[in-house]
Image (spheres, rainbow, N blue to C red):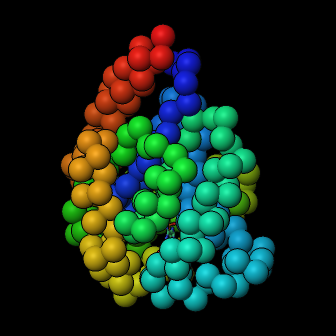
Amino acid sequence: MVLQRVVRAVIMGPPGSGKGTVSARITKSFGLKHLSSGDILRANINAKTELGLLTKSCIDQGQLVPDDVMSRLILSELRTIEQSGWLLDGFPRTVSQAEALDDVYTVDTVINLNVPFQTIRQRLTSRWTHLPSGRVYNIDFNPPKVAGLDDETGEPLIQRDDDKPETVTRRLKSYETQTEPVLEYYRSKGVLETFTGTETNKIWPHVEAFLHRKLSSINQRVA
Ligand SMILES: Nc1nc2c(ncn2[C@@H]2O[C@H](COP(=O)(O)OP(=O)(O)O)[C@@H](O)[C@H]2O)c(=O)[nH]1
Ligand SMILES: Nc1ncnc2c1ncn2[C@@H]1O[C@H](COP(=O)(O)OP(=O)(O)O)[C@@H](O)[C@H]1O
């Protein structure tokens, strides 16, 4: 689909709900630029930047990075891709972050992946990540072609430290207390679209059909 105007979208859902997996499909089908807050933070930690050193302990403990740090980081990244449509993944995670985003950009649509916590726990302990690209694999769901190696680059995959069961519990708690209110924030603005299920392959066709409708209606309004 060729877009006549930039589309600004957010994908939300608890850790492990499939945001990264679905984002990869959205970018492929609709050409939006994917910006993942977690990928940006992990790249900084890996490169031992000042930001990486500052945020590592929060992430390892399953806590959120402070709002002002996150909002500054993501808004400055967004400025560099202002001319493109984008899909934000992992930001905003608090109402304060949502307000900071809202001060600068109007979000057209928010895709909310509603996946039960029980399903998520099993997935995260078998998640393997290619750090430089953010590509994710799963031993059961989408294993790499060669165990332990990224399909595209052949580079090693890692298991994230914060995917340990006790840290996952803390991340889910922080999702409930700090991130769920963001769903209400977007619901009241009339832009929240929730997709419920336990399997990405069943959720995806609904997300795809919804985005086709949504993007066509945005294009028609501009035409
Ligand atoms: N078993 C199973 N695993 C899935 C499914 N969808 C995604 N995953 C895996 O679950 C893990 C978490 O997905 P991810 O996209 O990283 O979620 P995010 O944390 O919300 O970005 C990854 O290892 C995925 O490969 C699914 O439908 N079934
Ligand atoms: N918007 C944000 N606000 C605060 N902390 C964040 C944000 N995005 C990512 N983080 C930190 O990075 C960690 C990993 O984030 P992410 O990769 O998005 O997790 P997941 O893919 O499991 O949802 C979070 O647990 C948190 O510590």
Q: Give whichever of 99, 67 is nearer the camera.
A: 99
Point 77% across, 77% down: residue: 49
How far from the left and from the top, in percent, is residue 41? Answer: 63, 70
Instruction: Using the image, determine if residue 128 lies above or below residue 107.
Output: below
Q: Give whichever of 23, 201 is nearer the camera.
A: 23
Instruction: Using the image, determine if residue 71 lies above or below residue 58.
Output: above
Instruction: Using the image, determine if residue 192 lies above or below residue 13.
Output: above
Point 31% across, 42% down: residue: 191
Left or right? Give the position of 30 relative to 76: left
Residue farthest to the top, as pictured:
223
Point 57% across, 46% down: residue: 34
Regarding residue 103, the answer to whether it shows in the image is yes
Left or right? Give the position of 97 relative to 32: left
Residue farthest to the front, as pictured:
103
Point 60% across, 74% down: residue: 69
Instruction: Using the image, determine if residue 5 lies above or below residue 62.
Output: above
Q: Give whichever of 5, 16 is nearer the camera.
A: 5
Regarding residue 139, the answer to whether it shows in the image is no
How far from the left and from the top, in percent, is residue 88? Answer: 51, 50
Numbered disc total: 0
How far from the left and from the top, in percent, is residue 119? Answer: 26, 64
How far from the left and from the top, in percent, is residue 155? Answer: 73, 60
Q: Give whichever of 47, 68 is nearer the camera.
A: 68
